């Protein structure tokens, strides 16, 4: 048997979380920029009604399992009172310089029972020592240590490649800090990552999107793939990040029309979670420090619709082998199937066919697929059938099916199908 890559226990836990909420908040929220230059005065940062509790409440209500906050974006402004630079909340008028956005967000997530993670941009347009590699590595390691040690358990540390194309950092050192202080946290896409970037900001994974990889794209601004340090595990599942307002990671006034449509958000779910990846959907808090109602409403509508579709399977089975048959008590209308491999055994399925029993007792092929991995959602024109059969056409070793569920979502109580 060929040796298969296997996930770690913390990778499996992370893959089971499936849905994360990204919060881009910082200096840009007050200047209308997408990428601040790092020259904006700290006095610009002054949310009038900051409430991290509202962010976590919305995340929980919608159904996200974790929240990731931009502790520092490319402009270098730090949302926590770091000892490494004056360019932080400490120098801002907000809460008289006594506030800590990272701390309040971590506590709110804990209170609502959702995971918390941080984004710490390696590229820093403010910090004067950025141009000296060794000095900056030290500075960045200090910032990372503060975040890793001061805010409870983290589910993920987001190392953004943007702006760092061609730049070298002491990733070994950064990785050993994460390993030391937050061994269960996922490391995103740089150094010795445990999860990778899907390669676009559309929230849609290519299919198949295998869990194994040796390289990934580093940013939107280079076609080059990044090859990681050799210690990288071969199992590096993908995360799909996308802003809920078209191409806007930070909030800007009067841009509600950029909100993605309900149909598009549903497509994003099918294209990310439905292809075995995690989805990280960005909802940007505004200059009050609150997530706008329209954005929260769109995310909640999306996730309610998803729950409606998938909370009540017609039937669910599990098991092993190269064929599995699900029978219904009577002819039943079906339009979705959800498959999950038990990835603790690796990604064993390479291709499969899904069939429906015909009235004369024969089998009709509905579709074929390749990767299943953590999850695969298939939708098809409704069929009336009394049995479904999953046939594994090609596999690395005997498949372990964690779940094979059938659904009929074309019901009157659901939003129009797309
Ligand atoms: C990109 C950044 O340049 C964007 O501003 C944003 O943070 C996105 C998530 O990653 O690479």
Image (spheres, rainbow, N blue to C red):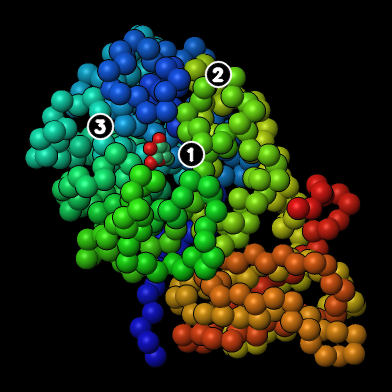
Label ID, residue 22: 1
Asked whether disc 1 touches disc 2, contact meaning CB atoms under 8 Å apart, the reply is no
The percent position of residue 307, horizontal first and vertical second, equals: 71, 51
From the viewer's perspective, is residue 174 above or below residue 144?
below
From the viewer's perspective, is residue 319 above or below residue 104?
below
Q: Is residue 227 left or right of residue 185?
A: left
Label ID, residue 116: none
SS under mark 2 = loop
In percent of the image, x 26 and y 39: which residue is there? 122
Ligand 1 is found in the corner quadrant, namely top left
The percent position of residue 365, horizontal first and vertical second, equals: 74, 82
Please tell me which of labels 1 and 2 falls first in the chain: 1
Asked whether disc 1 touches disc 3, contact meaning CB atoms under 8 Å apart, the reply is no
Q: Is residue 403 left or right of residue 276?
A: right
Please tell me which of labels 3 and 2 falls first in the chain: 3
Q: Nearer the viewer, residue 355 or 386?
A: 355
In the picture, residue 159 is in which quadrant? top left
Look at discs 1 and 2 and give the one toward the viewer: 2
Label ID, residue 124: 3
Q: Which residue is disc 2 drawn over?
A: 253
């Amino acid at each position: 048997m060929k040796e298969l890559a296997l996930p770690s226990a913390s990778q499996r836990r992370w893959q089971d979380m499936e849905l994360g909420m990204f919060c881009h908040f910082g200096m840009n929220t007050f200047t209308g920029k997408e990428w601040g230059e790092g020259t904006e005065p700290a006095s610009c940062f002054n949310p009038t009604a900051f409430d991290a509790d509202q962010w976590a409440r919305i995340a929980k209500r919608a159904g996200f399992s974790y929240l990731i906050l931009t502790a520092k974006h490319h402009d270098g402004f730090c949302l926590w009172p770091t000892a490494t630079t004056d360019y932080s909340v400490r120098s801002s008028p907000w809460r008289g310089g006594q506030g800590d956005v990272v701390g309040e967000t971590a506590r709110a997530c804990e209170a609502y029972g959702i995971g918390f993670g941080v984004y710490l941009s390696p590229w820093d347009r403010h910090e004067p020592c950025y141009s000296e590699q060794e000095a900056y590595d030290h500075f960045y390691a200090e910032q990372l240590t503060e975040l890793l040690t001061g805010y409870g358990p983290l589910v993920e540390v987001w190392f953004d490649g943007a702006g760092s194309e061609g730049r070298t950092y002491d990733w070994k050192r950064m990785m050993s800090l994460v390993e030391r202080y937050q061994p269960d946290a996922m490391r995103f896409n740089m150094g010795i990552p445990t999860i990778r970037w899907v390669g676009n900001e559309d929230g849609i994974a290519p299919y198949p999107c295998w869990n194994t990889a040796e390289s990934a794209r580093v940013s939107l601004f280079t076609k080059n793939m990044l090859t990681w340090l050799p210690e990288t595990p071969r199992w590096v599942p993908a995360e799909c990040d996308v802003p809920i307002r078209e191409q806007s990671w930070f909030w800007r006034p009067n841009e509600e029309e950029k909100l993605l449509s309900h149909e598009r958000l549903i497509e994003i779910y099918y294209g990310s979670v439905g292809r075995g990846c995690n989805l990280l959907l960005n909802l940007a808090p505004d200059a009050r420090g609150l997530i706008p109602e329209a954005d929260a409403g769109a995310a909640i509508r999306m996730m309610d619709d998803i729950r409606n579709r998938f909370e009540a399977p017609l039937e669910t089975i599990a098991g092993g082998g190269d064929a599995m048959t699900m029978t219904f008590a009577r002819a039943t209308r079906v339009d979705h199937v959800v498959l999950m491999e038990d990835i603790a055994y690796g990604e064993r399925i390479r291709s499969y066919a899904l069939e429906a029993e015909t009235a004369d007792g024969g089998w009709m092929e509905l579709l074929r697929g390749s990767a299943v991995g953590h999850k695969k959602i298939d939708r098809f024109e409704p069929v009336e059938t009394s049995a479904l059969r999953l046939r594994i056409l090609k596999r690395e070793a005997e498949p372990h099916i964690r779940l094979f569920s059938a659904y009929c979502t074309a019901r009157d109580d659901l939003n129009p199908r797309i």
